[in-house]
Amino acid sequence: NVLVFGEDIAQHGGAFGVTKGLLDEFGPKRIRNTPISEIGIVGAAVGAALTGLRPVVELMYVDFAGLAMDQVVNQAAQNRFMFGGQARVPMVLRTQGGSGRGNAAQHSKSLEAWFAHVAGLKLVMPATPADAKGLLASAIRDDNPVIFLEHKLLYRTKGDVPVGEHLLPLGTADVKRQGGDLTIVTWSREVVFALEAADNLAAEGIEAEVLDLRTLVPLDKETILASIRKTHRALVVHEAIKRAGYGAEIVSLIVEEAFDDLDAPPRRLAGLETPIPYAAHLEKTVVPQVEDIVRAAKELAS
């Protein structure tokens, strides 16, 4: 009862080759191309999910999600509530976002805060191949609509992946690196940057703990708070624009639940309030890089 559809996802394998080979393995009834209509793609997924299927649909870029938001917000997210729990919408909406490929303003956004604000949606943003496999498998099995946001630069990432069935529960963060001087809370591609920054900080005697949220909704509050109570300092890093970004939710949680454990005010490091530029040298200046994380962490730890 699982089927996959979206723009160019069959023969072509999708914009980034993620679905390559699925057509040969599962056939045209389960792997289908669609017209260029984001609202039609998501609407078809909602209908399929309501009638017993588990669709996995792909939007070519998260920037195009705005064209489908009526179906995402008013249908997929709300039907279970509007029908008193008698309707289920077990669908996964996969899409790609983030900067770094020179795709410019209309193909490089980070819009996780949009989806996180909608009651009824779950939101996943993996950073490693193993996490992507385990979280996607769990998302497909979930009876709620799941937004699965992938960073386009992470498609190049290589790593060990468990063979066979691999499930990671939604709502579980992962401590990617242990440390005692401060906690770097982050997700998606910034996890890679944070780990490199932590290595650089260690060379200067600062041990940073790197916490990968993996799932933004539901949020693993317990793991976040446990890390803060251990290190007493928090640096929240994300690529999306700082204003009204999801990092503010993390800082609010820390202040509300672990204020007395803090040795310094929590700090956010995030994207500048501007569209993503096309030029490569400008693109890097508007989202946090490794050196930015190192600088902010040193200031916080001092």
Image: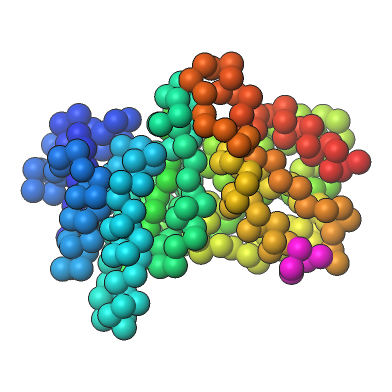
| Residue beneath the point at 68% across and 64% down | 253
Q: Where are the magenta residues, as a range?
A: 255-259
Residue displayed at 20% across by 68% down: 50
Figure check: 113 above or below 102: below
What percent of the width, then of the height, locates residue 28?
8, 43
Q: How is the image coloured?
A: rainbow
Residue 102: percent from the left, percent from the top? 46, 21
The picture places residue 207, in percent across and down from the top left corner, at 81, 41
Q: Is residue 249 left or right of residue 42?
A: right
| Position in image of residue 41 (x %, y %) | 21, 49
Specify whether residue 226 is in view.
Answer: no
Q: Is residue 264 visible?
A: yes
Q: Is residue 112 or residue 157 the one in the foreground?
A: 112
- In the rendered view of the protein, which quadrant contains the C terminus? top right
Q: In the orientation shown, which residue stands out farthest toward the bottom?
A: 84
User: Which residue is depicted at the point 84% across and 43% down?
Assistant: 300
| Quadrant of the drawing holding the N terminus | bottom left
In the rendered image of this protein, does residue 229 appear above or below residue 211?
below
Residue in front for this viewpoint, 24 or 146: 146
Q: Nearer the viewer, residue 31 or 255?
A: 255
The overriding secondary structure of the stretch rendered in magenta is helix
Question: Magenta stretch: residue 69 in it?
Answer: no
Horizontal side, residue 50 vs residue 75: left or right: left
Residue, x 57% and y 33% (percent of image)? 274
Residue 95 position (above or below residue 87): above
